[in-house]
Amino acid sequence: MTQPIGYGGRPITPAPGAPTPELRVARFRGHARRLFWSALVLIAVAGAVGYFYGNLPAPFQNWMLLLAAAAILLVAVVLPFAAWWSRTYLITTRRVIARRGLFRRATRELEHVRGYSIDLRRGILQRMWGAGTLTLSNGVDEPLRMVDIPSAELVHEVLVDQVEVNQILAHRDAQPLPLAPDSPPERG
């Protein structure tokens, strides 16, 4: 038996009953535009420290300037960057995985074969940047929200395709294999 040829960029389907490997389709984080204000604060603090350092009347004020700049950078730059960096989304050929947390990782998974509804919401700024928020709900578990992801329409299409392909393969694999014409009949 020959393998079927994929059309329109679709993956080649495996032979019935053959194990299918789990492949990574996409891995991404939320849109980086959230870090815009952090970048501006970083530039402003660097400019202010460069201008005022050494120009203050007392030497201990230079150290106070550096401590204040470090506190501002920690709160306004490092913490938002760590929050953005700690949340990742992974789409494979079998499931969607959402991970968050730096020190204590929390993972949520949603399998394509079970099926789920996909809700895409986009605000005005999200439309300008091509981002959006996807909510995946299977009706049983708490909905999985993928907040402010880039290329939201493309991710939506990929998820719809993966659900369709996984459900087709699950249905096909649940059917009994036909007997070959030259095989002896089964005895019961």
Image (cartoon, grey):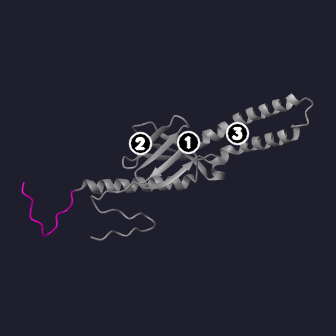
Quote the CA–CA distance across marks 3 and 2: 36 Å
Q: Is residue 13 left or right of residue 68?
A: left
Q: Residue at x 19, y 62 (%)?
A: 178
**Magenta stretch: dominant SS?**
loop
Residue beneath label 1, please? 87
Q: Residue at x 49, y 49 (%)?
A: 90
Q: Residue 23 at x, y = what percent? A: 43, 56
Are circles 3 and 1 on residues that touch, CB within 8 Å? no
Q: Residue 74 at x, y = what percent? A: 70, 35
Residue beneath label 2, please? 138
Quote the CA–CA distance across marks 3 and 1: 16 Å
The kind of residue on which mark 1 rests is Arg
The kind of residue on which mark 2 rests is Asn
Query: Tag on residue 77?
Result: 3
Q: Residue 102 at x, y = what percent? A: 56, 37
> Label 2: few (<14), some or many (≥20) within 10 Å?
some
The span picked out in magenta is 176-188
> Label 3: few (<14), some or many (≥20) within 10 Å?
many
Task: Look at the image and tell me in which quarter the C terminus lies.
Answer: bottom left
Q: Is residue 184 magenta?
A: yes
Residue nearest the viewer, comparing 46 with 138: 46
Q: Is residue 40 left or right of residue 88?
A: right
